[in-house]
Image: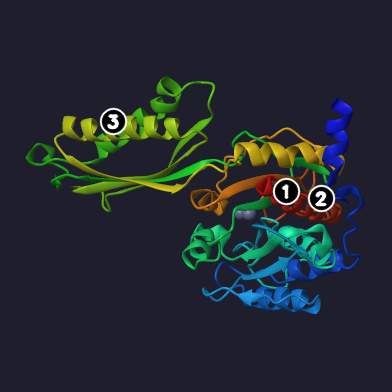
Amino acid sequence: MAEERKAASEVISGTRIADVEPDAGLAHIRHLLHQHPELGFHETWTTTTLSRLLADRGLEPRTLPSGTGLVADIAGTRPGPLVALRSDIDGLPVAEETGLEFASQNRGRMHACGHDLHMTGLLGAAFWLASHRDAIAGTVRILFQPAEETGRGARSVIDDGVLEGVQAIAGIHNNPDYAPGEIAVGLEPMMAGCVKLRVDLHAQGTHAGYPQSGTGPLEALASIILSLQTIVSRNVTPFHPVVLSVTEVHGGSVWNVVPAEAGLLGTVRYFHKQDSELVERRFRRIVDSTAAAYGITADVVWDDFQDPVVSDPSLGAAVAADVPGYAQLAPIRPSMAGEDFCEYSKVTRTVFAFVGSNGGPDHHDLHSPRMVVLDEAIAPAVRFYVAAALRLLEELAS
Ligand SMILES: [Zn+2]
Ligand SMILES: [Zn+2]
């Protein structure tokens, strides 16, 4: 029985994924993409380049209505569902310090999140799928999404109707904590939900020498900042990772005036919706009652910026079961960073994977000016995209 299951996961729709041979020119393409990073919604060179590469293979890419990013459909020889594969395409305002031969040529811009690997992996999958249409029962929509780093790219894709009719979508993020050839995908949450916080305290203000003549916000602000740190330590279950960080405080501009206004900014990261609801309740309670205790008022902005990234349970399990047939299935080590891929879960079924991209003892993290993605990560990325597309088509057809 176990043998049967293993054999089944090595072959999807008649294709042995381990035999999917990525295009020899992909490393060169990746280096080219890496040299030309562009910021979100400004990826014009990237869009033109991807478009040309897809058109060279007989595909008909369409630039997205937002102006950057593109989509191309690969129809199989047999009818079936419509599924999508997504890569983000934007870089970051980071000055590259890797010293790589193919380092960024755009000053102050870098593919420091490794989206050049995602693009290359998806291009490789598109090339392979376009020349193996007999392996496809249905249609695979190739989506190069702009502006992931702004948190607004996926939303714009959805608002432009690009996902209409798409029954499931798979995406990846490279992860330098894992070695090339390791892939983590499954049921557990992978990337954190993210809340943006803002508190504005309103007092009366007064002369610093006559504090009794008014009210001030600073003592309340100090007290709020310390009290907020008890939410994770005293209220949230220790078995769920949650972070609450205060990252900016403002208030006052001179030494001899008690200011009327002060406030803070910060963020909450979480993996379970019930934790974020609990933190929000405690957060509002602490701010409102502390302000009241000091005789001032408070405005709270709780902006649910991004949901956690977690795969659809049955599709995530099905895609994960295939991985040992072509790569090493690694345990999910969740990331406290956010991902706008979570937006797609609101409109369709999703599968997300970490693709190992470095794994060396001294590797640098995503967004670091010294982050290095290894070319050895390209082939596993291509194979994951191909395997996920074929598996999703098969699961949705049954
Ligand atoms: Zn990033
Ligand atoms: Zn990223």
Secondary structure beneath dot 3 equals helix
Q: Is residue 252 above or below residue 164?
A: above
- Does the beta carbon at disc 2 come under 8 Å from ligand 2? no
Q: Is residue 105 above or below residue 147?
A: below
Between disc 1 and disc 2, whose residue precedes? 2
Residue occupied by mark 1: 394
| Colour convention of the picture | rainbow
CA distance separating discs 3 and 1: 51 Å
Looking at the rendered structure, the kind of residue marked 2 is Ser
The location of residue 227, given as percent across then percent down, is: 34, 28
Secondary structure beneath dot 2 equals loop
Residue occupied by mark 3: 286
**Mark 2 and mark 1 in contact (Cβ < 8 Å)?**
yes
Secondary structure beneath dot 1 equals helix
CA distance separating discs 1 and 2: 7 Å
Residue occupied by mark 2: 13
Describe residue 343's horizontal placement relative to residue 296 as left or right.
Answer: right
Where ligand 1 lies, by image quadrant?
A: bottom right
In front: 16, or 46? 16
